[in-house]
Image (cartoon, helix red, strand yellow):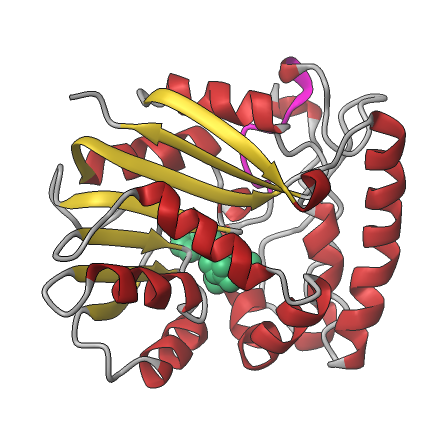
Amino acid sequence: MIGRFRRLVPPGPIRRRSLPRLPFARASGAGPSAGDPSEVRPGNLVPESHVAAMFDDIAPVYDRLNTIMTLGLDGRWRRAAVTATAVASGSSVVDLACGTGKLAAALAEQVGPFGRVVGVDLAPAMVELARARYRDLVQLEFLVGNALHLPFADGEFDAATIAFGLRNLADFEAGFREMARVVRPGGWVVCLELSVPRPRWWGRTYHLLFRRLAPVVGGLFGRRGAYEYLPASLEGFPRPEHLALTMRRAGLVDVSYRRLALGAVALHRGRVPA
Ligand SMILES: C[S@@+](CC[C@H](N)C(=O)[O-])C[C@H]1O[C@@H](n2cnc3c(N)ncnc32)[C@H](O)[C@@H]1O
């Protein structure tokens, strides 16, 4: 299946202005998020080194741009993700692809000073920002690391989260498997991610608008290239129902999801079998 996608970003050094113009090849006739599971991408085709360099570059403007692009709704979505973990005071959580640490900090508030939250991100600049911003939360730490190869023991955490990070991973199912590995039996794995709204005509219109507007807004902050990646990374990304299947294939049970923001965002969760 992967052979049907062209590898469009050649590995090599990153220059700021040549940051990926990242054209996920579209599954034939499938549109922005393929309807047939066989046409859905199993992972991000952009090499991890490029992804890390791109997020390092946008780290200083990431939060501002995020607030603009989500119309300030991202805080509400993250709170829904915290609730989905079902963690309480004293619990432990790992937040993958933590970026500047907003979800990790919300989780840290939830588990309190006797809990533990670890944020992990591939981009060192994101991790530096997160560390500087939340150094007063004793229960919260940040590590540079790859969500697909976590430096944690099996069952070390009560829950695992990933927000707007999954679509960057080279293998979505492997991402869920790694999350399930580090969560204790009975704990929740939670994924908040962009999606393409229904019905199909609106999904296409939305995607077209997103594709046009995101680079323009990114360009205002001198980051046009990186913000071409954002809508492109949605192309061929599994629809919510297919993402739920991916979670089940990764070994999670009681998998469910809800659409937020008229379907532009999806919140999934699944439990590690007891
Ligand atoms: C769109 S940002 C989301 C940040 C944050 N979770 C949020 O909700 O704002 C995606 C993040 O995923 C990180 N990332 C991409 N690939 C990763 C990987 N393989 N392992 C860990 N982090 C990764 C990027 O560095 C970036 O900070």
Q: Residue at x 54, y 67 (%)?
A: 55
At 42% from the left and 56% from the top, the residue drawn is: 97
Q: Is 258 placed left or right of 36 in the picture?
A: left
In the figure, residue 37 lies in which quadrant? Answer: top right
Query: Which corner quadrant of the image does residue 21 belong to?
Result: bottom right
Q: Is residue 39 magenta?
A: yes
- Residue at 44% across / 76% down in the picture? 125
Question: What percent of the width, then of the height, locates residue 93?
Answer: 23, 52
138 shown above or below 55: below
- Magenta residue span: 38-45
Q: Can residue 217 be spotted in the picture?
A: yes
Rendered-image quadrant of the N terminus: top right
Asked whether residue 51 appears in the rendered view, the answer is no
| Residue 87, placed above or below residue 172 | below
Q: What is the number of callouts on the image? A: 0
Residue 269: x percent and y percent? Answer: 40, 33
Q: Is residue 206 magenta?
A: no
**Residue 256 sits above or below residue 144 on the image:** above
Compare residues 164 and 89 and report the one nearer the observer: 89
Dominant SS in magenta:
loop
Q: Position of residue 158 (x, y in %)?
A: 18, 43
Q: Nearer the viewer, residue 62 or 125?
A: 62
Which quadrant is the C terminus positioned in?
A: top left
Drawn side of residue 44 relative to residue 16, left or right: left
